[in-house]
Image (spheres, coloured by chain):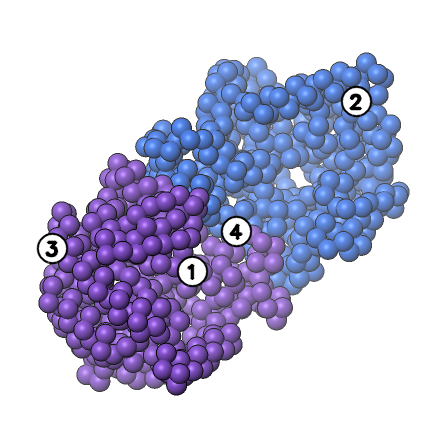
Chain colours: A purple, B blue
Amino acid sequence: MFDFTITARDPHTAARVGVFQTPHGLLTTPVFAPVGTQATVKTLTSRDLGELGASLVLSNTYHLYLRPGTALIADFGGLHSFMGWPGPMLTDSGGFQVFSLAQMRKVSPDGVIFRSHIDGSLHRFTPESAVRAQEDLGADIIMCLDECAEPLNRKYNEEALVRTHAWAKRCQAAQRRHDQALFGIVQGGIFPDLRVESARTLAALDFLGYAVGGLSVGETKDQMYATLDLTVPELPAEKPRYLMGVGAPEDIVEAVARGIDIFDCALPTRVARNGGLLTQAGRLNLRNARYAADPLPVEPGCECYTCQHFSRAYLRHLFKAEEILGLHLATVHNVHFMLQLMAEIRAHIAAGTFAAFQETFLAGYQLPDQEVRHAQRAARKARRQASGGG
Amino acid sequence: MFDFTITARDPHTAARVGVFQTPHGLLTTPVFAPVGTQATVKTLTSRDLGELGASLVLSNTYHLYLRPGTALIADFGGLHSFMGWPGPMLTDSGGFQVFSLAQMRKVSPDGVIFRSHIDGSLHRFTPESAVRAQEDLGADIIMCLDECAEPLNRKYNEEALVRTHAWAKRCQAAQRRHDQALFGIVQGGIFPDLRVESARTLAALDFLGYAVGGLSVGETKDQMYATLDLTVPELPAEKPRYLMGVGAPEDIVEAVARGIDIFDCALPTRVARNGGLLTQAGRLNLRNARYAADPLPVEPGCECYTCQHFSRAYLRHLFKAEEILGLHLATVHNVHFMLQLMAEIRAHIAAGTFAAFQETFLAGYQLPDQEVRHAQRAARKARRQASGGG
């Protein structure tokens, strides 16, 4: 049911093209999943997603467990029918949100107790309940409950890893539905030995696929890439590999080169709603006054609905006037950009030209100033922690 | 260029079907124009509007004059190309918003000075500048600057009417583009003699069409209908008649019966964004807990995208989770409802069955409780003013 076939390998990098068979259709990898946190990719209909060429959509178990409740969605035949998305879906376990969003949390070997960020109510996730919730949701790819530790904190990562590995086994044992591919999640922060230990431990459990978690959460880009360099080779080569929550264009290109097959990230849709439009040259900020009378589309030559019909001036007007249509049109463009990028990546891997594409793309793609500053801050913090023996 | 041909008349009421030719296409009347205040019908793309069967779209000159500026839109070739709507458009003169939205206003025979509701900046509209702004925008149907007085205040209506009539002549004289149909606007509040005087004065000016303004702004529904009863017969029978800003389903059916051809109203799109969904039985409030697990579409049998794909439970979830998609899907349904209602109205007029349709529709369509209470309050206020000689 979950056959994964690698159909092309790049001769110069670890990049590969594959076809992953799921109950709701084939995924051609490397694939990017737009994030539909609350059973909707913000501002887009299912029809929009289909027309944009999305093949995989992610939803968040934590959010749907709290509202409207996974049991209610099960009564509607699962997420696919509830939200009207007929294609492949992926749900996370809820673990990441418990550790990043919930108001209070108390971790024990058994699981995690937390308060809802919505109403403060008390809840508990265990490996078993996380699997059960995801079985209610019915996504094609589901995830083990894991603990995402602060990436630079060695002691916390050591302790969390023990739980993450024990929970992975319990998730495997708890799984009742076999039309869902359960993936294990490698953790271990930026620590090479922990990452290798985690990858090997999970590889031995023979999951249908493997995720790399705990990245893009505070470490530098170099640390992220270095972690992938040593983690990915430890994962079974014939299984799909999923880099959780990573999806800035430059990170996707770098991670594909390191052998990652599946991505999800809220960044393209979130920055769209802030007026940040992705282009080959980097991010364009629609709120900038320079676009007030600009007749060009966001990216000349782009074939998305937004660029085919509207000027930067019109889009800027919509943002200045706080019109919802602006959020929608910007999201359409950014999702198109990401899916187009993935299609180009796949074509270049198949043609053996991925390494050259990687170089050209990264040379042309300028990071936003604030991200450069953020990366510099993170690098300084990492150096301080390293020299201080943190 | 603006030929208006009446193709069917109802045998029992003043309802009629017509075809109004405009530079951007034919309008089959009675027609409802969704409101695109700021050069966008909130949450809908032009493609959505086309697929929903919208033929006429309204934009507000006041808003576009303030932001992004009518001159900028002129540089883009007008509203049609700026917002990507290829079909017929209508703009108001800005007068109504100056009298309802702007922070301060000072009226003189020359025009009106007001402060922007956005930034408090000072502006002036004159009949000439209102026409010029609308020529910049380039809509197919444009309106004279008028003064919309409080409908129950006799003295104010008398004074305002003098200005409205003088301004109508000045608008006519100021018009330079003749690919736009300039409509005169009848005012006069709820006062029969003023309404008749206004209709006759404007009829003598031989506009290409006539609007009835100043209704649905505080009077009772009975007062509105009574005003139409005596105003419409005074308007040239062979010209299109436009009831400004009126668009509750029950009011449209009543006004069509009195001979109105064109409608616009923000109500269907505004209530949609509050979770109010229009159905044959009245308004359904999606936020109501009774819909939390309801698998039915908003209106069984409805052919809109929303009803064809999503349950009330899913839509309610989107509203509770404050997801933008909920606003979009609700808007799609309500605009579909209005355009479908207009299509049914036209079919019934053509078939000679409109009177029966009117009776059946109004019997089945229940007004929301708060509207009933509002109407009762307005009626009491009107009675008090009448008995007090107000």
- Looking at the rendered structure, the kind of residue marked 3 is Met
Determine the residue positioned at 12% across, 53% down: A173
Do the numbered discs 2 and 3 sit on residues whose CB atoms are within 8 Å?
A: no
Residue that badge 4 annotates: A324
Determine the residue positioned at 69% across, 58% down: B69
Q: CA distance from mark 3 to mark 1?
A: 31 Å
Q: Chain of mark 2?
A: B
Residue B377, position as x, y percentages in the image: 68, 21
Confirm whether residue A354 shows in the render: no
Residue that badge 1 annotates: A269
Q: Is residue B94 above or below residue B377?
A: below
Q: Quadrant of residue A319?
A: bottom right
Is residue B86 left or right of A178 when viewed as pictured?
right
> Nearer the N terminus, badge 3 or badge 1?
3
Mark seen at residue B191: 2
Q: CA distance from mark 2 to mark 3?
A: 75 Å
Q: Residues within 10 Å of mark 3 (few under 14, many from 20)?
A: few
Mark seen at residue A1: 3
Q: CA distance from mark 3 to mark 4?
A: 41 Å
- Looking at the rendered structure, the kind of residue marked 4 is Ile
